[in-house]
Amino acid sequence: MITRTVPDIVVGRLPRYLQALEHMYREGIKTTSSQELGEAIGISAAQIRKDLSQFGEFGKQGTGYSVAFLVEQLQSILKLTRIWDLALVGMGDLGNALARYQGFAEHGFRITAAFDNDPEKIGKEVAGLIIQDSREMKRIIPSLGIKIAMLTVPASVAQMVAEELVDAGIRAILNYAPISLNLPDDIHVENIDPIIKLQHMTYYLD
């Protein structure tokens, strides 16, 4: 189980390990080593062993890791043994694309509610979801037990909408708005800003 003493940077690497191990599993690979896993994702074997040791002992000296067992353990640590319902807020081009993306369901996530404040969008169907009025979030989100939201609204309203989501019971936000959110410490926010990533990469180009 994850404890409060595990650094967030370590938790952040676990999904990368899981992704690589799931690929190995699909390829029929039964065992792997920290060296092989590290080569697959560009992280040192020593770092992988150190990270995994935060949660217990998963391999044996000289025999490596059982891929299937380690997949199961990481899924348990990351609480991926259940389906997580998501709220999608902001049904513009990006919101529509996310609603149609099949990869969420393949990894234990399910968009169960979509919201927007545009009267022309409210009531329309996208990928089996009926877009609902964002003013109803505080009523609908708790009734569905949703704890995670994806935010795809303009930067100018992102902070306000994020605060409304927190008031509605959301505890984690995947933020696609190009702005940092100022929320309570117990609300986990992950920022997805392609512009920042592009600007990072251009540094290395001629």
Image: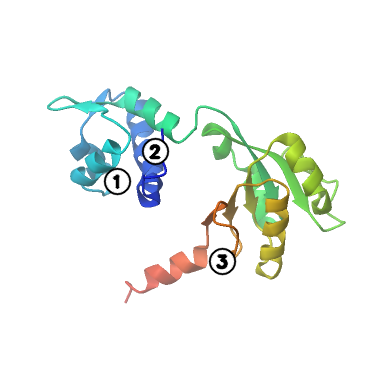
Front in this rendered view, residue 201 or 138: 138
Under circle 1, the secondary element is helix
Residue 59 percent location from the top left of the image: 22, 27
Residue drawn where x is 32% and y is 31% of the image = 24
Q: In this image, 80 relative to 49: left or right?
A: right
Residue drawn where x is 51% and y is 63% of the image = 194
Task: Identify the amino acid type marked 1.
Answer: Ile
Q: Which residue is mark 2?
A: 19
Q: CA distance from mark 1 to mark 3?
A: 28 Å
First reached walking from the N terminus: tag 3 or tag 2: 2
Q: Which mark is residue 180?
A: 3
Label 3 crowd (10 A; few <14 / some 14-19 / many >=20)? some
Task: Identify the amino acid type marked 3.
Answer: Ser
Name which quarter of the figure residue 164 lies in. bottom right
Under circle 2, the secondary element is helix
Under circle 3, the secondary element is loop
- Marks 1/2 in contact by CB < 8 Å: the verdict is yes
Q: Which residue is mark 1?
A: 41
- Marks 1/3 in contact by CB < 8 Å: the verdict is no
Q: CA distance from mark 3 to mark 2?
A: 27 Å
Name which quarter of the figure residue 55 lies in. top left
Front in this rendered view, residue 127 or 77: 77
Quarter of the image for the N terminus: give it: top left
Residue 91 in sight in this render: no
